[in-house]
Image: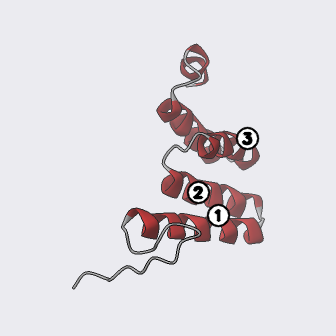
């Protein structure tokens, strides 16, 4: 998986898969570096923030885990149009 990523470092999907594999091998600090890079590129922010939260849980940093889980939840609500964009006062009506 690492070799695959080294041939195409711009392939964010492969990077996410590699980061998940590293996390499963109990190397959350290394995985978090890749997840933060994915966030900087804007790649699937809700999912990547949640995966980053899991990495921090594995590392024992519950404060950071809670932070990234909350960001993931907010991002999901924004994607579902249940919450306005950051810095706006838009009101959204929940569907019935």
Which residue in the rendered view is the most extreme toward the left? Answer: 96
Marks 1 and 2: CB-CB under 8 Å?
yes
Alpha carbon separation for disc pair 1 and 2:
5 Å
Residue 74 percent location from the top left of the image: 52, 70
Looking at the figure, which quarter contains the N terminus? top right
Q: Which mark is residue 11?
A: none
**Quarter where residue 36 is shown:** top right
Q: Residue 49, labelled with which disc?
A: 2
**Which is nearer the N-term, disc 3 or disc 1?**
3
- Considering the numbered disc 3 on the image, is that residue within a helix, a strand or a loop? helix
Secondary structure of the residue carrying numbered label 1: helix
Separation of marks 2 and 3 at Cα, in angstroms: 15 Å
Between 32 and 95, the one nearer to me in the picture: 95
Badge 3 is on which residue? 30
Where on the picture, by quarter, is residue 68? bottom right
Question: Closer to the N terminus: mark 2 or mark 3?
Answer: 3
Depth check, front residue: 66 or 29:
66
Residue drawn at the location 56% of the way across and 67% of the way down: 86
Quick one: label 2, few (<14), some, or many (20+) residues within 10 Å? many
Which residue is located at x 41 percent, y 62 percent?
79
**Local SS, label 2:** helix
| Residue 94: x %, y % from top left | 31, 82
Earlier sequence position, callout 1 versus callout 2: 2
Residue positioned most to the top? 7
Residue for badge 1: 68
Q: Nearer the viewer, mark 3 or mark 1?
A: 1
Residue sitting at x 64%, y 43%:
40
């Amino acid at each position: 998986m690492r070799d695959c990523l080294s041939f195409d470092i711009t392939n964010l999907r492969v990077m996410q898969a590699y980061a998940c594999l590293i996390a499963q091998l109990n190397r959350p600090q290394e995985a978090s570096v890749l997840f933060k890079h994915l966030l900087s590129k804007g790649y699937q922010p809700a999912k990547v923030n949640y995966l980053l939260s899991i990495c921090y849980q594995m590392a024992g940093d519950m404060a950071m885990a809670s932070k990234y889980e909350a960001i993931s939840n907010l991002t999901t609500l924004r994607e579902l149009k249940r919450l306005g964009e950051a810095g706006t006062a838009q009101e959204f009506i929940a569907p019935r």
